[in-house]
């Protein structure tokens, strides 16, 4: 009988402890804890997976490229991400150095990356007559990063690229 009472008490204590632990509340503030996210929450103590990101590109070309495009009878360039036109600019517009992201008069592209920190897209560049200068080249948007993407005119009347990154 003693053994039965001890056994009953043991089950009762184990059950009580399990119930008590299962009722404890987690008082941590949940939210986005990634500093690189658009929705960073400085008060969050625990990441809840809600972080969202954007990436940026600023596309530019210098005087040599501008003159090459004009000599090729191009008056404007149309920039596509996938099949969506995102910007148009006159070929007579050029920069002497890499512009800042979102600078006035630049080809600035911002992409919503959702919950991923990096996402690849296809960039195409055509002129007003449909002549392709770049056809679906892969560009990678990174969270909280601005890529300065230079179009460079080559002797073969084609364009190539150079990139630099800023945060």
Image (tube, helix red, strand yellow):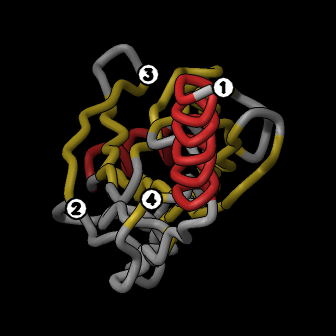
Helix or strand or loop: what does disc 2 sit on? loop
The residue that label 4 is drawn on is: 47
Q: Mark 4: few, some, or many residues within 10 Å (few <14, many ≥20)?
A: some
N-terminal label among 3 and 1? 1
Q: Distance between the residues labelled 2 and 1?
A: 31 Å
Residue 118 picture location, percent across and down: 46, 37
The residue that label 1 is drawn on is: 132
Give me the residue at 30% from left, 23% from top. Answer: 154
* Residue 4 visible from this viewpoint: yes
Can you tell which of label 2 and label 4 is closer to the viewer?
4
- Relative height, residue 25 to residue 161 (above, below): below
Can you tell which of label 1 and label 4 is closer to the viewer?
4
> Is 38 or 151 nearer to us in this picture?
38
> CB atoms at circles 1 and 4 under 8 Å apart?
no
**Residue 167, labelled with which disc?**
2
N-terminal label among 3 and 2? 3
Q: Distance between the residues labelled 3 and 1?
A: 9 Å
Give me the residue at 56% from left, 61% from top. Answer: 20
Q: Mark 3: few, some, or many residues within 10 Å (few <14, many ≥20)?
A: some
Is the N terminus in the top left, top right, bottom left or bottom right quadrant? Answer: top right
N-terminal label among 2 and 1? 1
The residue that label 3 is drawn on is: 158
Residue 121 placement: quadrant:
top right
């Amino acid at each position: 009988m003693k053994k039965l009472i001890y056994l009953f008490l043991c089950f009762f204590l184990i059950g009580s402890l399990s119930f008590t632990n299962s009722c404890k509340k987690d008082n941590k503030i949940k939210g986005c804890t990634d500093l690189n996210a658009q929705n960073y929450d400085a008060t969050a103590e625990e990441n809840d997976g809600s972080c969202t990101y954007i990436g940026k590109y600023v596309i530019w070309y210098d005087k040599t490229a501008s003159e090459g495009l004009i000599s090729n009878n191009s008056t404007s360039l149309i920039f596509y991400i996938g099949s969506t036109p995102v910007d148009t600019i006159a070929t007579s517009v050029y920069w002497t150095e890499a512009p800042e992201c979102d600078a006035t008069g630049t080809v600035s592209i911002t992409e919503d990356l959702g919950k991923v920190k990096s996402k690849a897209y296809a960039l195409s560049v055509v002129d007003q007559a449909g002549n392709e200068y770049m056809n679906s080249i892969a560009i990678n948007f990174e969270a909280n990063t601005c890529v300065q993407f230079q179009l460079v005119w080559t002797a073969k009347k084609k364009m190539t690229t150079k990139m630099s990154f800023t945060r």
